[in-house]
Image (cartoon, helix red, strand yellow):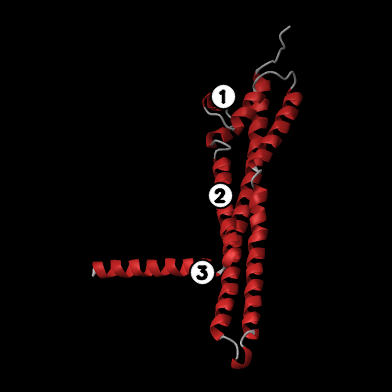
Amino acid sequence: MTDLLSHALLADTANGLSLLLESLRSGGSVMMLIVLCSFAAVTVSTVTWLRVREALPQFASKGDIAPLHDFLQRHPSMLSRLALMAVSGQFTTKQECTEVVGQKAKEQLHALERDMPYLEAMVTVAPLLGLLGTTAGLVGMFSAFGEGGSTGPDTFAVAKEIGVALRCTIAGLLVAVPAVLAHTFFVRKLDGISMRLESILMDTINTFYQHFEVQRAK
């Protein structure tokens, strides 16, 4: 019984892969472009997720300067660079420190967002490529109608072109929908990081200037 089930699963898997490869082949160059869009969307999503995940440590949200200072010495990250600047003592006043660190924080957040335009482009390009493939399939379908002559249209060729059109549409949507979800998720995630980062840095700066007097060497 187990062997029969295993053979059935292997057969279904092989049939599914064959159908997938046939769909990709029948879509032509437009389908290949959609596949490239899908790879680009997955790559950008993965890279952005890894970058965002390591942006802020969880314990830093407590606002305690002691564990934060220990983290800065051991782990390089966006937060460590900004917080080291905040507690470096190179600024005479808290206002000056807040302005400079805030500007640097904006630059770091912009670096986190640098791949987002590519993901946003995939959201727009993928369905357009699907529409292009659909249009090409419709052109082929009408061409098959015209080439039938007195014997009538070649139903096999017409059905094939309709299949190409539908497959390109489905492929474009299959790329665009996850890309939209990923883009929305990362936008919300980056907004949250921006708010937490501002709060953490302000707590750090206030704590530092509350307990230490900054004096420049003469």
Foreground residue among 177 and 170: 170
- Dot 3: what SS? helix
Residue kind at label 2, given as amino acid type: Thr
Q: Quadrant of the N terminus?
A: bottom left
Return the x and y of residue 162 as percentages of the image width and height. 58, 78
Mark 1–mark 3 distance (CA, rounded to whole Å): 56 Å
Q: Read off the residue under disc 3.
A: 23
Q: Read off the residue under disc 1.
A: 69
Marker disc for residue 119:
none
Q: Read off the residue under disc 2.
A: 43
Q: Classify residue 174 as left or right of residue 3.
A: right
Mark 2–mark 3 distance (CA, rounded to whole Å): 23 Å
Q: Residue at x 76, y 24 (%)?
A: 96
- Dot 1: what SS? helix
Q: Classify residue 169 as left or right of residue 25.
A: right
Q: Residues within 10 Å of mark 1 (few under 14, many from 20)?
A: some
Say if 198 sits above or below 149 in the image: above
Residue kind at label 1, given as amino acid type: His
> Mark 2 or mark 1, which has the lower sequence index?
2
Return the x and y of residue 161 as percentages of the image width and height. 58, 77
